[in-house]
Image (spheres, rainbow, N blue to C red):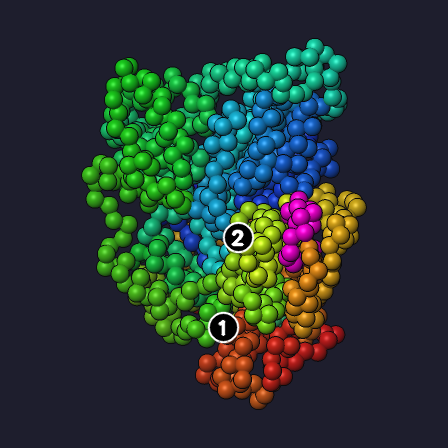
Amino acid sequence: MSHLIDTNLTVDHLLMGNDAIARGALEAGVKVVAGYPGTPSSEIIEGLANVANDMNMYVEWSVNEKVAMEVAAAASFAKLRSMCTMKQNGVNVASDFLLHLSASGVRGGMVIVPCDDPGALSSINEGESRYFARLVEIPLLEPGDFQEAKDMTKWAFELSEELRQVVMLRSVTRLSHASGTVRYDPLPQSEVNAEFVYQGFLLDQMEGIVITAPVGFRHTQQQEKIKKAREIFENSPFNTYTGPEKPDLLIITSSACTLYSREAIDVLKLEDRVGLLKLGTTWPLPPNLLKKHLAMADNILIVEEVLPFLEENVKVLAAEMAHEIGVKTFYGKNDASLPMVGELNPDLVINAIAKIMGIDYQAKSENYAAKAQATVISGAPQRDLTFCPGCPHRASFWSIHNALELDGRKGFVCGDIGCYTMAILPTGFQSLKTCHSMGSGSGLASGFGKLGQFGFDQPILAVCGDSTFFHSAIPALVNARHHNSNFTMVLLDNSGTAMTGFQPHPGLEINALGQEVPGLDIAEICRAMGARVEIRDPFELEETRKILNDLIEDTQEGLKVLILSQKCALSPERKAAKKYEMSIDESLCIGENCGCNRVCTRIFRCPGLTWDKTKGVTRLDEVLCIGCGVCADICPAKAITRKEAA
Amino acid sequence: MTAKQLTKDPYNIIITGVGGQGNVMASRVLASMLVNNGYVVTIGETFGASQRGGSVMSHLRVSTRGSWSPQIPKGKADVVVALEPSEAIRVLCDYGNPRVKILSNTRPIHPVGVIAGELDYPSMEETIKSAEDLAAEVWFIDATDQAVKLGNPILGNIIMLGALSALGDLPVSIQDFKNVIQNSMSKDKHDINLTAFGLGEKLIQQ
Ligand code: SF4
């Protein structure tokens, strides 16, 4: 049985933040959950999909975040409780629908859970979902620890039903992917019946039609909801104060920064001088609660990650209340007490407090720090990111790189988000020259492909993964085909959303619940658009290189598509069985004297191969090599050989 | 259950290694043992891109006082468990202090820069010397080699956990380990894991 539906209410459960959110949703009786995979949010849906049968739920990985939000909203309109999850940039994708949803309101409780990634630990942006809550005027909740992640998620559904408004519960990497102890509440037994009622009075949110018009009426109603949320938040148990009655410094914080702030006060032993106001309801802010606490201190430090969202909102209230609470000195982002880029940690908060309060703090003695620094430089060689041993992307980019070199017209690749983003690094032969949002490589290529009339003659390639193809590349390809834009789309098809852990997508014949479903054929879709479509196995290096040059040189106007199809090296199928037994004949390897100047370890760089400096030959690492056989084809001396594995 | 007083509260453990070594599993098993014994444990982990050949770290905060930051403050590690030797050294730069203890596996995993011949990997003697220079107590054990003898290199993690329990700072025993795997592992794996844990204990006690 999954630990998510454990019925033991009297012990501490060790839960990842994402699991705590999932448990909270289960305790609220959520019925429909949809999302698009993205670190650090993916485990919420994975966990819920595992227990969907036990709890009679419907859970899906949707094609993208906007559709996920629409799927979840439909359930809410039919009076079910529903949730939708995504990483921070997903909120941008869903935001058009969110703007309208917040105007029409919801029926069954509906919670959206974006997981932000301050510091971009596994992202290529530091996007902020908090601002969307303010922009579209919906309540924002931010749990400050693991127990709250569960409790606040459960409460978010009740709040949503009380307000008849969608509620945003925002998490961050350091909560979603950290673990802590959580006490459970009971799981509900109730069964519900779904029905979409629309026969009632036109303007009745619960029984009429669900639309955003008349705009003035709905917008007024929406702002009434925000007012009501503000009142409810005044007494929320998720807003707490700890510290003296008249602190020298008041810290206002939320989310994971609560833990950093608590730690900082403990490390500096300032419990008697520093107060901590921890807010769980961060938009709209409850003014009376803020007034009471702002009145306690003259110096205020606001601790939050990336942009000064909380800081700005608190300052507006403080300005309005200045005649009652007096003039305050604020510390935070605007005075550079804390950085506006990157994630926070206890030390950044410790240093900020120490500076404000004139305290001397050193994490370690200068002596030790210098010694440790020197030792690391020699004792711990840097670990660069690399494609896994046997990764199809290494082979694909090898051929792309070679095809563009051979062509010699300064061709380049437009990319986007996925494992293949690493092709900006040496592991992908630095092939990617642009990288932005999901599917944007295809859209950019569509634009580059129309620059011919201005003398542009560089070959253009775009890459995207199979999951990204469905998520957002399709409209760009439609655009390219319709406008006769000249470029070659290379689809790196590794049969799954590999980077985030093999979630299924519309191209596969299985869904999040493990059920058999129709899979859509990428090649057929591209052919239906009228593109020239070729399919190759990227492990056939020469074949792949040849077809790439052929496509690049094709003078026919318009879109060409090359599908490079090979399973991810981490996929269960490929992990289960080696295709080839590899061996290296050290007498044939002439290392640095070879015409190739050891191209295998210097450039191709599969971690399954190691350069033995003392002997001057390449060696095989039997533990890491997964036997894809590709390196045998790049060794001109034929020192690397492969034999079909038994 | 009321938990015994810790030698330090919060007691800070770093488990470090390279993506794919089973860092996350090791930290969860250890944390579960401690939670069962009545402690509040917070684990901070790096996931995602760090799975692809990068360094991976788990921070464990063990306390009787409540949840702490999932990132240990700089210079405040109490013990470093390294599944890969050069990672032990790397961690000390930020989190080390003269009182820290180090427990490290001896099997290296070469970074891609070393594979490419651009960087040098230190010898075992150099690594041990660096560790001794920077830490109060140091143990290097050949956990992976022992695990390979038991039939599966991934058991190296469990050997390391057995060794950690034998250091004596943390109130966890082989019995606690048994309780945890009873709920989290299939039955056929229990014996071999208990053997590995016991082996780790012995490597320290010898
Ligand atoms: S066969 Fe060669 S390229 Fe493939 S995983 Fe092994 S070492 Fe790497």
Which residue shows up at 54% across the image and 81% down it?
Answer: A596
Badge 1, how many Cα within 10 Å: few under 14, some, many 20+?
many
Alpha-carbon neighbours of circle 2 within 10 Å: few (<14), some, or many (≥20)?
Answer: some
Residue located beneath label 1 in the image = B115
Q: Quadrant of the C terminus of chain A?
A: bottom right
Name which residue type carries label 2. Answer: Cys
Q: Residue furthest top?
A: A201
Does the Cβ of the disc 1 residue fall within 8 Å of ligand 1? Answer: no
What chain letter is assigned to the residue under label 1? Answer: B
Q: Which mark is residue B178?
A: none
- Highlighted magenta segment, given as a residue range: A473-497
| Residue A241 higher or lower than A587, as above or below | above
Q: Identify the residue at horizontal 48%, vertical 56% (top origin).
A: B56
- Check the residue under mark 2 and report the chain it is in: A
Residue linked to disc 2: A435
Q: Nearer the viewer, residue B100 or A558?
A: A558
The correct choice, above or below, for B103 with respect to A80 in the image is: below
The picture quadrant where one finds residue A373 is: bottom left
